[in-house]
Amino acid sequence: MTDLKGVLSEAVGAAFAGLGLPTDLGRVTASNRPDLADFQSNGALAAAKRVGRNPRELAAEVAERLAADPRLASVEIAGPGFINLKLTDGALAARAQAIADDPRSGAATVSQPRRVLVDYGGPNVAKPMHVGHLRASIIGESIKRLYRFRGDEVLGDAHFGDWGYQMGLLIGAVTDENPKIAEIVEALNAGGSADTAPFEAVTLADLDRLYPEAAAKGKADTAYRDRARKITAGLQDRQPGYFQLWQRFRDVTQVALERDFHALGVDFDLWKGESDVEDLIDPMVDELAAKGLLEDDQGARIVRVARDGDKRELPPLLVVSSEGSAMYGTTDLATILDRKNSFDPQLVIYCVDQRQADHFEVVFRAAVLAGYAAEGQLNHVGFGTMNGTDGKPFKTREGGVLKLADMIEMTREKARERLHEAGLGEDLPADEFEEIAGKVAVAALKFADLQNFRGTSYVFDLDRFTSFEGKTGPYLLYQAVRVKSLLRRAETEGVKPGPIAIAEPAERELALTLDAFETALSEAYDRYAPNAVAEHAYRLSQAFSKFYAACPILQAEPAVRASRLALAGATLAQLQTALDLLGIATPDRM
RNA sequence: GCGCCCUUAGCUCAACUGGAUAGAGCACCCGCCUUCUAAGCGGGCGGUUGCAGGUUCGAGUCCUGCAGGGCGCGCCA
């Protein structure tokens, strides 16, 4: 299905071709001046430069060739040579009708679907998720849905951090604190057998408490750090005591993670972790050595990735540490190999904090050197940080890191408050009210994040995000619910949608906005930029709201009523699709 | 020190990859509910796009320099 921009680009392109000029000059975009036109082409300006002619003259010749097009109500030249196009109401109505009849709400699919893997989330075993994981989850989930909707075959992978130094630190800390567990670990490591039941006593809260202490000690105390590294290497060697205790860490973490992700409406197809590629590492190291990529350096084994012409000095990829353990770059590289051997993605999107840009550059270069990926196939889609109102990375009032679960509950509480303030949902059963509050909270958090371009940092301001007024998630839910309510009423009154006709300005604007969905999606897709979808959802809501205020629906005469009802239905379908692509679910009532 | 990113209305952010008069929301002011959810709609106020040059018909967008802010720079992830 082609949108109006595409249809008109073809027509204008043909007109340019008729003058012996390149077809691509006909590229049409939405008008910058809605008061003058629906669409515009700037091709004459570009052409004038190439062929050395007056742009207005060229534009006039193109316009002449377009004059007979029955879909166009007017073709005008303006300014230095803009070609302004206005559609007939009939052509607009036909497009709106096609969108209303389309289960995809007018969105196209890519011509060549790819296998795409989205790597996001990145929670760590033994550490509760904190606000830092929020953006990865929100943006990654949206990108996954967007790519899938465009027709690609997409897998989302949570990619646990479960195999590094922090595991060694924690095993050390837990055994220090609990002699009984230390005894069992030692016995198992020595090849003996022991009852591991006491491991069950280790809770996520314990790990949560011990990790910061251990990490701090590791920084300050060289001996402590070296022991943790040795334990890490031992774990990676599958020494039974370390390995079984580690499994307990993984289990207690998994439960909490699933709960947090579920609350956010985030799902993964793969729950793979660093440990899943452990078996690949030794052969991979051998292979890298055989290819002559590996170098010994200060007791470690590295791959140098610097290139001529680099503006900065990139560090090498550290493959094996001086203690013999795998580093995160090692598992990242092995994961690339693992994916190549299984899903064989044509594109991998790493949705990870922008601060890790250098790290990914190093890993990607190493992957290309090793022949595990082609140049450009691995793509780091970075994002900025979420800051507090002081402009610095978000912290609690006490200065600590806020757990994700706490943030979600905070937002949910705020949502309940807002609903009560507005006197909404009070006649609903308690469980439905809770469900609505949950959806409002998720919509508030996600829309606040996704309305900004991912690369920029933004300020976390709960009061603003949860407001029902203005450009917020709750506002969008309200709009969707309002349409649902309208459609329910039509249903009970036995009113059916019918053929769409366009007459009023508000109807025109709504139809044009519905048509712009495809442009927003392709931009979001090409630039890994969900904010284009968020922007569209908001514009659609506004256009509908204007229409809703200006054009009575159920009170209108039957033909108009049927048309407007169809427009309302098309709006709801597209709005829900757009929100779904942002990972936002819509309640039926509020 | 080297490198990357950022600086747009009082505040929070957009701007379809170089196009017309730089747009939204919040805040503030003025209108609109006996009619489909007013959590809404309409109107107004608000700008030397950090500063200085350059490229061209045309720059928030590209190039150079400067100022301010953030981040990264091998055995954490």
Image (tube, grey):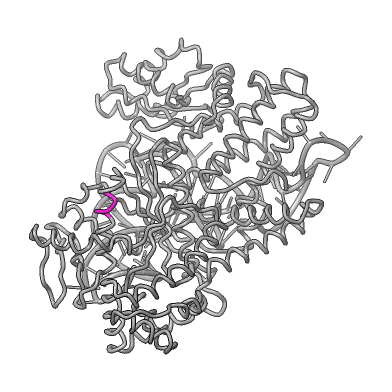
Left or right of A548: which side holds A297?
A: left
Depth check, front residue: A557 or A201? A201
Residue B12, above or below A111: below
Residue A8 image-quadrant placement: top left
In the displayed image of the protein, which residue is found farthest to the top? Answer: A68
Q: Main secondary structure of the magenta part?
A: helix
Residue A541, above or below A388: above
Left or right of A247: which side holds A584?
A: right
Residue positioned 51% across, 51% down in the render: A451
Residue positioned 20% across, 65% down in the render: A317
- Magenta stretch? A336-340
Total number of numbered discs in the rendering: 0
Q: Position of residue A462 (x, y in %)?
A: 61, 63
Left or right of A274: which side holds A2?
A: right
Depth check, front residue: A250 or A207? A250
Q: Position of residue A41 (x, y in %)?
A: 41, 27
Residue positioned 64% across, 62% down in the render: A463
Residue positioned 24% across, 24% down in the render: A51
Depth check, front residue: A27 or A111? A111
Q: Position of residue B48 (x, y in %)?
A: 45, 53
